[in-house]
Image (spheres, helix red, strand yellow):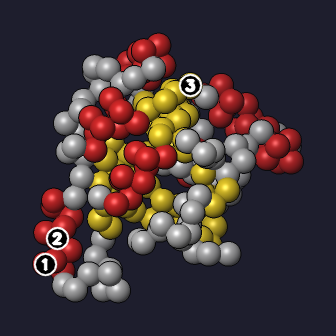
Amino acid sequence: MKEKAVRAVFDKETITVYQAYRPAIAVPAVKNQKFVPPFKLDRMTWIKPSFLWMMYRCGWTLKEGQEHVLAIKIKREGWEWAMKHACLSHFDEKMHTSREEWKEKLQNAPVRIQWDPERDITLEKLDYRAIQVGLSGEAVPNYVNEWIVEIKDISAQCREIHQLVQNGKIEQAKALLPQEEIYSEDELVF
């Protein structure tokens, strides 16, 4: 299995990413099908196409301030714009000529890419990585105003899967997981 690959739910027009928020941000976002205040356009926001990595990050919706998990369908053209305007969040000598070149690119890039260990249904580390995408600068209003197609609160589904895992009903839990596939190895340069 490839160590780094974007695994996601997607179709010809959209890719689904996940974010977790407190109710004050999540509830209005679902209602308006758009992020509205108190969501801040001037802060970096991280999107994750891996459902299980999101569950690891938010503790199956149990972490304070991350009680609502949103499944956000965005336009593939937005995702692909983000990939073209991104910089790795860490220095990689295979990709960067020097630390200085990387720091300058990082400072100017509106998108950051980070690779973290993917998780299994019990949230244990797997031997391959999941992508996290940090949006800042011009990428945030693009995301909010142009890329989003649908915002759905999937918190109840997350808690149902977690309950099945806790009860040892792993196969039942797995049957409820989003069906993620490799997005595209051709466009991945990180």
Helix, strand or loop for disc 2: helix
Q: Viewed as shown, does residue 95 lie left or right of 158?
A: left
Residue 110, x across and y down, in percent: 24, 52
Q: Viewed as shown, does residue 44 lie left or right of 53?
A: left
Q: Which residue is denoted by mark 1 in the rendering?
A: 100
Residue 47 in view of the camera: yes
Dividing the picture into quadrants, the one containing residue 96 is bottom left
Helix, strand or loop for disc 3: strand
Q: Viewed as shown, does residue 92 lie left or right of 74?
A: left
Q: Which residue is denoted by mark 2 in the rendering?
A: 103
Q: Which residue is denoted by mark 3 in the rendering?
A: 153
C-alpha span from label 2 to label 1? 5 Å
Identify which residue is drawn at 62% across, 75% down. 2
Residue 47, x across and y down, in percent: 43, 45
C-alpha span from label 1 to label 3? 41 Å
Tag 1: amino acid: Glu
Identify which residue is drawn at 65% across, 34% down. 158
Residue 7, x across and y down, in percent: 60, 57
